[in-house]
Image (tube, helix red, strand yellow):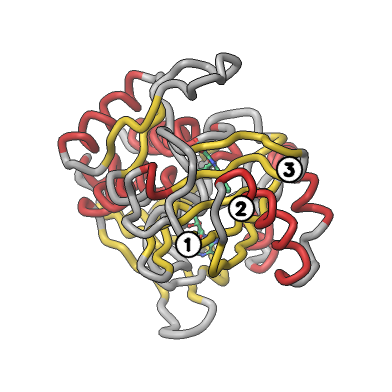
Amino acid sequence: MKIVVVGAGISGCVCAYRLATEGHEVTLIEKGRGVGGRMATRRMDGARIDHGAQFFTVKDERMKSLLADWQAGDAVLPWYDKVPGRDDLVKRIRYRGRAGMTGPAKLLAESFKFEKEFFVESIFRGEKWEISEREGLNRKLVADHLVLTMPVPQILELLERSQFKFGAQVMDKLSKVRYTRCLAVLGIMNRSSRLSMPGTITHPTPEIDWISDNQIKGISEVPACTIHASDEYSQKFWDIPDQDRAPCLIRTAEELLNVKITNWSCHRWGFAKPLVTFGASQYLSKSYRISLAGDSFGGERIENSAMSGWDAASAILSSDT
Ligand SMILES: Cc1cc2nc3c(=O)[nH]c(=O)nc-3n(C[C@H](O)[C@H](O)[C@H](O)COP(=O)(O)OP(=O)(O)OC[C@H]3O[C@@H](n4cnc5c(N)ncnc54)[C@H](O)[C@@H]3O)c2cc1C
């Protein structure tokens, strides 16, 4: 079967990987330049910085099998299981990418065809699915089955552009999905920070959820930090210029890390973590031959999103027999 998966986050990559290894002809489409989605790693002034998700945890047996593959492929490493002095945080192994959080998605992507910088403008169901690009190369793909894995608000925008609707009950559940926002600041530091392993600070102030030192984490030779603002701060300053909203976050980080931030950039994650999900780990419409997956379905966290992609693939494989 010809299957097109839209979205190269972990859910799309896991789904595409499973379908491809079962012998289907899979193409994964992504509007960005690479795979990973919110598992994003960026280069800046010689530093390597994880600017979206920072680590993942593993509970499910299926996720353990993926982890074993990623470890065998040298893509991931254990980062830490506890933070000294923070007994309130659950003791559990947090894994990181060896060279950044995009590692697992890059490894999965070796098993299927990848079309990058392809923004899906519209989808149309005739005898098969037709998937059309917004602009650029004006690519058009045809598929027997289509999988959408972006956050539900983006799925709804695509459905509207395509004048496509599911039944009322499904549309109602989709319309209720909600996300937090997150302003992320990536900073180059003038020297190594004063943190020790694992190089993280969680919720130091109401404005900040997370600070990490990418050098201590082991992914950057150049001292560089990631700062994630809280949902409240991000919502409040979402439309304010970077020069006005970043300095407060930078000052706090400089104080806590005992460094000067010499260069920085700010990024907006409009759909950071789901607050309200669809209520099932994936959705499959057998009549239209379309599946929906991602953390809007599986729930917050990389593992849940990956398992949503896995479940979507399982549902397609069993509906195909
Ligand atoms: C700041 C931040 C910190 C986080 N920290 C953690 C953490 O430490 N641990 C953890 O477990 N989870 C964390 N998360 C959550 C985790 O990153 C997500 O749950 C998970 O990565 C979501 O994967 P996904 O495949 O569902 O979606 P995504 O990764 O968002 O993938 C969807 C993809 O679809 C693409 N796309 C969207 N629209 C289109 C279109 N029209 N055409 C083509 N492509 C399109 C997007 O570019 C994107 O690549 C964090 C998230 C954020 C934002």
| Residue 254 seen in the current view | yes
Q: Amino acid at mark 3?
A: Arg
Q: Is residue 277 above or below residue 165?
A: above
Image location of residue 217, percent across then percent down: 38, 42
Q: Residue at x 38, y 43 (%)?
A: 216
Q: Earlier in the sequence, mark 1 or mark 2?
A: 1
| Circle 3 residue | 178
Q: Is residue 26 above or below residue 115?
A: above
| Marks 2 and 3 close (CB-CB < 8 Å) | no
Q: Residue at x 49, y 31 (%)?
A: 304
| Circle 2 residue | 254
Label 1, residues with CA under 10 Å away: few <14, some 14-19, many ≥20: some
Q: Nearer the viewer, residue 264 or 43?
A: 264
| Residue 1 seen in the current view | no
- In this picture, residue 273 sits left or right of residue 262: right
Give the SS element for disc 1: loop
Q: Earlier in the sequence, mark 2 or mark 3?
A: 3
| Circle 1 residue | 190
Q: CA distance from mark 1 to mark 2?
A: 10 Å
Q: CA distance from mark 3 to mark 1?
A: 38 Å
Label 3, residues with CA under 10 Å away: few <14, some 14-19, many ≥20: some
Look at discs 3 and 1 and give the one toward the viewer.
1
Q: Nearer the viewer, residue 117 or 208?
A: 208
- In this picture, residue 113 sits left or right of residue 261: left
Label 2, residues with CA under 10 Å away: few <14, some 14-19, many ≥20: some
Q: Amino acid at mark 2?
A: Glu
Give the SS element for disc 3: strand
Circle on res. 70: none
